[in-house]
Amino acid sequence: MCELLGMSANVPTDICFSFTGLMQRGGRTGPHRDGWGIAFYEGRGCRTFHDPNPSAESEIARLVQRYAIKSLIVVSHIRRANRGRVCLENTHPFSRELWGRHWVFAHNGQLQGIKRLPLGLYQPIGTTDSEYAFCWMLGRIRQTFPEPPRRPATLWRTIRALSQEINERGVFNFLLSDARYLYAHCGTQLSWLTRQAPFGKARLSDADMSVDFQQETAPDDVVTVVATRPLTDNESWTVMPPGTLAIFGAGQPVAAFGS
Amino acid sequence: MCELLGMSANVPTDICFSFTGLMQRGGRTGPHRDGWGIAFYEGRGCRTFHDPNPSAESEIARLVQRYAIKSLIVVSHIRRANRGRVCLENTHPFSRELWGRHWVFAHNGQLQGIKRLPLGLYQPIGTTDSEYAFCWMLGRIRQTFPEPPRRPATLWRTIRALSQEINERGVFNFLLSDARYLYAHCGTQLSWLTRQAPFGKARLSDADMSVDFQQETAPDDVVTVVATRPLTDNESWTVMPPGTLAIFGAGQPVAAFGS
C-alpha cells in the first residue's frame, strides 16, 4: 500500500508541514521504501520531483522540506511497490499534457486486468498498472472532449464515470489534477481536511512536530489537504466512503460524487 | 541568448563538472538570469528540475551540483528571456510522451511566425516560441510515424527535415532527446567534445575548477558533452557549422547531417 498526499489552496501555500509527516512514512514509521514523488503546480507550470530512493533518506526530499515551494495544487506519493519494479519510470506522480495543460496522477492500490483495456493516444513509459490506468483515463477524456468542455461539471461527470469503471477492477485510490482542480477518488481509504479561519494548532501523527497555522496564514486563506490516512492527530478529518470522488478547487470542496 | 548543455554517455555519468560551469553563466559570469532547467534520463525514466530563479542563486541548482545524479542522457538550459514572460511553464527543457518514451527539448534563439504553423496532437502549456516549435515537431513526427520506425536513421532524417524547416524562421539551436539519442541542432552556435581514454585534465572557463577525468572514469567510458560555447579552455571542442544536426548515442557521434 502506498501513501497519497494532495493539497488544494486559494493562495500559493507550502506543504512543508504535511510533507514532513508523509516523508516519515517512507521508510521510517511506514514500510514505503520504494521511492516517492511530488508535483507542484505554479501557474500553468508544474514542477515535479521524483526519487526511486526511500523518502526518509532522500536528499531531494530534504530539499523539498527545507525549500518551501508555494503552490495552489500539490500531488504527492510514496511507494511500496507491488507491481512494477522499483525504478524512476515507475515512480508516481505521472504526468501528461492534455489541452495545453499539465495533468498529474498518483495512485495506490492494485488493479486486475487493467492492461487489457485498449489505450488511446497516451502510452505508458513504465510498467505499473497505475500509469496504465492514467493513460487509459486520459485517452478516454481526450476522445470524449477533443477540446475542453465549457462547463467544468461536464468533465467532472466523465472523470467520475471513468473512475467507477476502473474501480471495479480492484483498489483505486487516486489523486488527479488537471491544473485547475484536484480530484480525489477513494477506492478504500482516503481522508481530507479543510483548514480556514479561525486557524488553530496542528500536531503531526508521524513526527514530533506542531504548527500554529494562525501564525502562518492570512485570514482569507483556505487550504484542503487530502491523505491516505489523517496526518495529524488533533484535527477532524473527513474519512471518505469507498467509491466516492471529491473535487477540490481554490482550497475547498466544490463537488462530491457518492458511492 | 540562452545557453544549452547536453550529455550522452555509454555508462551512467554525472554532469556535475560541466553543470558547475554552466550555472556560473546564470547570473554570475553571464546574463542568463531568467531561470534554468535540466532533464536526466535514467533507464526509461526522466527526472527534470525546473527553476524560474537565476541558476547561480538557485537552491535546486546547488542540489543538482552536490547530488551527483548519474545519467546516460542529459539536456539542460539556462534562460535569458526574449519572448514569453519568466515563469515556470516557460522554463526549458520541455517534455512530452511519444511512443511510450519521454521526449525532452531545449532551445535557444528567436523564431519568426512559428505560431502560424498548425499544431498536431501536442499543445504548448506556456507561451514560448520554443515550446511551440517542440510541439509542432513532435506532432509532425507522430503524424509521420504513428509507431516508431524500425531503423533509427529513418527517424533521424525526419528530424533533420523538420529542423531545417524551422531553421528558416530564425535562430534554431536546440537539444532534443527521444530517450535513446541526443540530437543537437546548430542554427548559429553549438560545440561538442567527446571524452574517452586516454583521459586528461579539464579546466572550466567560467569557474576556478579543474577535474582529472583519469581519476573519475573507467577505461571504457565514453562521454560527449554539447554546449552553446565550450565550457573548458584546455580541450579541443568541435564547433558545429550553422545548419548542421549531430546525433549522439552511447557517448559518441553516430550521425551528422551537413548544412
Image (cartoon, coloured by chain):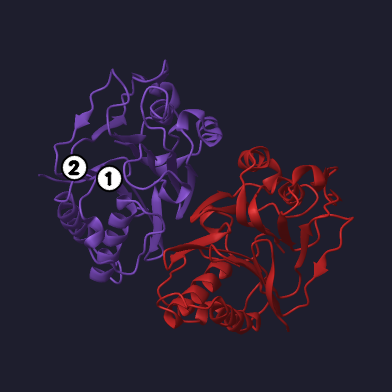
Chain colours: A red, B purple
**x and y, in percent, of residue B152 in the image:** 24, 58
**x and y, in percent, of residue B173 in the image:** 24, 43
Could you tell whether A242 is left or right of B112 in the image? right
Query: Which amino acid type is marked by label 2?
Result: Gly
Q: Chain of mark 1?
A: B
Q: CA distance from mark 2 to mark 1?
A: 8 Å
User: Which of these two is toward me, B109 or A32?
Assistant: B109
Disc number at residue B30? none
Assign the C terminus of chain B to one quadrant of the image. Answer: top left
User: Which of these two is toward me, A232 or A218?
Assistant: A218
**Measuring 25% from the left and 34% from the top, which residue is drawn there?**
B192
Specify the farthest residue to the left.
B259
Please, what secondary structure does the residue beneath circle 1 have?
strand
Query: Which amino acid type is marked by label 1?
Result: Phe
Specify the farthest residue to the front.
A219
According to the picture, the residue beneath numbered tag 2 turns out to be B187
Local crowd size for mark 2, using a 10 Å CA cut-off: few (<14), some (14–19), many (≥20): many
Q: Can residue A171 be seen at all in this image of the molecule?
A: no
**Measuring 48% from the left and 44% from the top, which residue is drawn there?**
B50
Local crowd size for mark 1, using a 10 Å CA cut-off: few (<14), some (14–19), many (≥20): many
**x and y, in percent, of residue B176 in the image:** 31, 49
Mark closer to the chain start, 2 or 1: 1
Disc number at residue B174? 1
User: Which of these two is toward me, B158 or A193?
Assistant: A193
The answer to which image quadrant residue A119 occupies is: bottom left
Q: Are marks 2 and 1 in contact (CB under 8 Å)?
A: yes
